[in-house]
Image (spheres, helix red, strand yellow):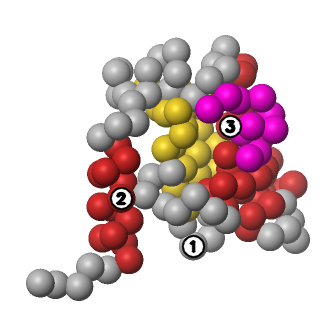
Amino acid sequence: MGVNTKSEMRLKRKRRIRKRVLGTPERPRLSVFRSARHIYAQLIDDRSACTLAAASSCEKAVAEAAVGRKKREKALLVGKLIAERARARGIEKVVFDRNGFLYHGRVKAVSDGAREAGLQF
């Protein structure tokens, strides 16, 4: 019996979650990925396997607004940005996919930002 690494455990959680979470054109999946330095969010339609909108802390608009801020505050900005882009496409409701990450810190901040900007999930 091998010891599972942190990344292997996250992927196990991800597979378990993805069995139940499915994005549709009317209610896409809001997928969040967290790296050591940045955070990324995508709206995904699983039926046609395409990304409807995306936002990340790498983008110029977020990076300039987040100078000198903590990573959690940058994640909040990313959540607000993805919600703006979703509402511009006429999307009001989404299904949240934490992608195997625990629901706290930056992952929670993305969802809080999206809720503040008007997305429902």
Q: Amino acid at mark 2?
A: Arg
Q: Is residue 35 above or below residue 41?
A: below
Which residue is located at x 76 percent, y 52 percent? 76
In the rendered image, residue 86, in percent from the top left (x then y), is placed at 66, 26
**Residue 39 seen in this snapshot:** no
Q: Residue 35 occupies which quadrant of the picture?
A: bottom right
Q: Which mark is residue 82?
A: 3
N-term mark: 1 or 2: 2
Q: Is residue 19 left or right of residue 79?
A: left
Which residue is identified by label 2? 13
Which residue is located at x 26 percent, y 79 percent? 4
SS class of the residue under badge 1? Answer: loop
Magenta extent: 112-121
Q: Residue 118 occupies which quadrant of the picture?
A: top right
Q: Amino acid at mark 3?
A: Ile
Q: Amino acid at mark 1?
A: Ala
Crowding around mark 3 (Cα neighbors within 10 Å: few <14, some 14 to 19, many 20+) is many
Which residue is identified by label 1? 36
In the rendered image, residue 55, in percent from the top left (x then y), is placed at 64, 43
